[in-house]
Each structure stands twice: as structure tokens, then as C-alpha cells.
Image (spheres, rainbow, N blue to C red):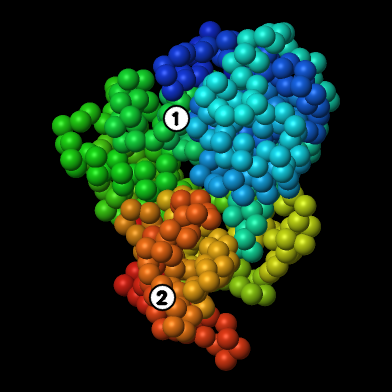
Amino acid sequence: MKTEMTTLDFLDRAVDLYDDVVGVIADDGTEYTYGEFNERVNRLSNALADLGIEQGDRVAMLASNTHYFLESLYATNQLGAVYVPMNYRLVPEDYEYILDDCEASVVIADYDFADKIETVRDSVPAERFVGYEADRIDGDWVDYAALVDDASPEPPERPTISEDDDASINYTSGTTGDPKGVVRTHRTEHWHALVLNQHMEISDDDTYLWTLPMFHCNGWGHTYAITGTGGTHVCLRKFTPERTLSKVRDYDVSFMCGAPTVLNRVIAHYEDNPEVETTGDRDVRIATAGSAPATATIETIEDDIGWRIIHIYGLTETAPIITTSNSPRRLAERGRSLKVNQGSETLCTDVRVVDEDGEDVPSDGETMGEIVVQGNQVMDRYLNKPEATEEAFNDRLPGYFHTGDLATIDEDGMIAIQDRKKDIIISGGENVSSIAVEDHLYDHPNIAKAAVIPTPSEEWGEMVTAIVVPKPGADLSKDHVEEFCRERMAGYKVPREILIQDDLPETATGKVQKYQLRQEFWEDEERLIGEG
């Protein structure tokens, strides 16, 4: 018997089985059972419908890790509308592009970030703007709480939703500068949550702390997986090591996620405060992705902090999880060093490493190729970018999504990333397009040439580094270049190191040899991507 796989299944199950269980704890400590949470979702669905939101419309969200982020996700999907979570670290021009590209009908924004939307609201298609604590926002915004309180708690009439209908659009940095909208269907979200459930060991007594931004691939799917399994979400509006450890103790947290930079900040706090308690009564596991954590980081987190690390790998386009090193069998055979690898393919996922002809490279742990993947969790398409979609699925091996990451694979199927084919830097878990940063640098009136590359960083895994050449006779300083960048791009994209040189290495045709520049910084590292 076939039934449609939709995102609605997860909250429906939580309400059926755990309606009296505390499902969501807000940042301020307010608790909602799944029954109460579902009523708030229904109210918001009805309110959005009253605002004219219909099936297929796009609802954009700009907020940190909050209960109303989760409410908005489920309320949007329940109407058959499409959820568009946005990175709160961007600048107004980015939001203008995203809202125009996805043709958002409504924007819901937190008071901390709404001013970035207010700046461009006259230039975007959205006509309805909802603000959390709207009295703290300049401009004409409908108050979120009033909207929910005034709406009916009755379940809205659900449209017929196909598993192939769009469920969400997640924007990721494009190598050509413009963000790309990764379209995920109900089926891909549903399937990924099930795979995640298996490999993250999620159970109905889990208490999950939101240290990972919810906007990242819809919180790596934990928005669905934790809910459907009956676990408890603990919202953390802003990450700090102090608040994180406090929440862990107060709510006996058993599971969380975070980029390696989160691990490093927790370690730094612990080293300054060795007496601090780092767990409640239960064991804690933490999943991390992006650049692999350094071996020393793993040892400190597991031996001193007392948290078990699960390392995963993936991209926004793949939900993200497609590999994991969480294999007790392999860990027993090969030890903790396995966790600095990206791991082996997840359940019902076909991950291969292929050469330029699309042939599998030898499983010798030495020969490099590109990681390609097939799986039900892989995106449907890039929004409004058919050529980019075609290339992504057909470059070396037709029918597989091409990640752009270059890796080796060993006899156990364990993958280790060595380099990147794409001009993407992953710093602190955020994707940065080096080309986009270069485009801004070339707008500087005193810069003749610019190259942006990743360089090693203990804190961030990889650091955005700019190497610039001034125009003849021009006065150029690092501070001025940094200030120029901060005025034009999100803070995490601003180069943390700026080098001023007389020239850049180039090919005979004038193309900058980035590979040569990178080698100068990574010569003491095992691979050309960040591990910290």
C-alpha cells in the first residue's frame, strides 16, 4: 500500500501519541505539550489563511532558534504552502534577492532581524509582514502573538498534498555569487528525517537542545525527526557556552548538534571554568558536520567534557546527512581517529567517489575523486536555475548529485574529504562563496586584483582570507579593506585575514592560480580543507 510521504506525518504522530508530553520549551522556559503546540500551529495556519496564504505560496521566515520558528514551519506545511527559512546573518541586499527569487507572499521576522527586511520591503513581492514582538520593530508589522491569539484553534482544512509537492526552499551560497534556492519536496524532507532518526539514535525520551541554527537545512531535519519521535525541543535563541551548559543541566539534555566552532567555544569555556558541570543525569551526544573536528578537539570533548561526538557529512542539497562515522563496529576496529573522516554512506543512500570519467576510483584511501550521491533525501532542483540543476546532476555521472567535494574512499567505504572543486569556503559551518567576496573586493576603487581562499583556523575550521593587489600608486590598508567589506556583506563572509601583495600568481591567460596560493597556507596540513 502506498501512502503519500509528507511532513505533516511528524506532528500528527506526536499529537496522537504524546499530546500530554512537553514537546517544545521556549527560550524563556515556557513549556508547551505537543497538544498545546499543535493548537498554536492550527491557530497560525488559520491566521495565515486569513491573510490569503494558499497552497504553493511561499512563507519566508527570519528568526533564530525559537518556538515560533517551529510553529511557522508546521503551520506553513499544513496549508500546503512552502517554507523559506532564511539565514539571519545576511545583509538586506541578500534578503531582497531571496524574497524576490522565491516570490514570497509573506515574511515572518523576529524583532532582532526585522529591520533588515524593513530596509528592502518596498522592493520585494511580499505584501504581508508579521513580526514577533512587533512593537519593537520600526514600520508597519502585524504582531505575531496577536495574530495567533485571535485565530481559531480548530484544525484548518488541509488541501490534498502530494509527496512531490514543494515543502521548503533553503538558500545556499552559489559559486557564482547569487544564493541558490534548494527546493525540497515533502518526500525528500520525510525520507531524510527517517534516515536521520536511524543514524542519530533519536528516541522518544530524547531532549534535544537547539544549538544548531534552525534555518540550516531546516535544522538538519531535526525539526521533523525530534517531533515525530516524540522527543523534546529545547530552544536556544542565541548560542553561548554558558547558556548552552546551563540548558544542558537544567533540562537534562541528551542530544544536540553544532559545527566544530561550537565545540571549540565550549572547550575554551570549560578550560577557563573546569569546575562547571557539563551534563545532567544522562549521557550527551553531539553531532557535528562541515569541516571535521581536529583529533585534539574530539579527545577533549569526549574525555573531559563527556559528550560523545557523531560526525556527519552532507550539503544543503542533500538535506544534509549522506554519510556518518557513527559506526560502533568500525570504531571498535579503527579507533577514534575514524571520527575525523566524513564516514560511510547512510541508510538507503548511494554515495560514490568517481574520477573525471564518472568511474569509481580505487578504494585505496589514496586516490581522489568527486563525491556523488543518489538518495531520496537529495533535493528536487535549484529554484529558477535549470542549467545549474542540469549540471549538478549530470557533470561526471548522470543521475547523481555532484557535491563538488574531492575525497578518497577506503576498503570500508569510509570517505575522507581532501579538497573542493567548488569555490566554497566553509567557515564555522557557514558556506561562503569566494567569488562573491571577490566581486565585492573588485568594487573597491583602489584594488587591482583580488583572490579569496580558505586558510586553516583552529576556531573556524577554515578562515576567509583575501589577498589583494593595490592599483599603481593607490593607498590601501587592511583596516580600510575590512571596513569596505563589512559595509557590503554579512559578517561571516568578511575576510578575517587580509594580505596586501605586489602581485598574484597567474596562468598564461591571466587566471589567478588559487591552488598555488592555498598550498602556501596548507602545506603543513594533511588536506586542503579545514579540520581545525
Question: Up-down: is 42 above or below 278?
Answer: above
Which one is in front, 15 or 92? 92
Q: Position of residue 438 (x, y in %)?
A: 54, 67
Q: Amino acid at mark 2?
A: Asp
Which residue in the protein does label 1 denote?
237
Q: Is residue 47 left or right of residue 295?
A: right
Q: Residue 271 falls in which quadrant of the image?
A: top left
Which residue in the protein does label 2 denote?
475
Residue displayed at 47% across by 13% down? 31
Q: Secondary structure at mark 2?
A: loop
Residue displayed at 46% across by 51% down? 491
Q: Is residue 372 visible?
A: no
Q: Amino acid at mark 1?
A: Arg
The extreme left residue here reads 275
Q: Is residue 131 visible?
A: yes
Q: Is residue 311 left or right of residue 147?
A: left
Give the alpha-carbon distance from disc 1 to disc 2, as whole Å: 43 Å
- Mark 1 is surrounded, within 10 Å at the Cα level, by few (under 14), some (14 to 19) or many (20 or more) other residues, namely some
Q: Position of residue 173 (x, y in %)?
A: 59, 55
Q: Residue 337 falls in which quadrant of the image?
A: bottom left
Question: Up-down: is 290 above or below 253?
Answer: below
Residue displayed at 63% across by 10% down? 149
- Mark 2 is surrounded, within 10 Å at the Cα level, by few (under 14), some (14 to 19) or many (20 or more) other residues, namely few
Q: Earlier in the sequence, mark 1 or mark 2?
A: 1
Residue displayed at 57% across by 29% down? 138
Q: Which numbered marker is on residue 423?
A: none
Front: mark 1 or 2: 2
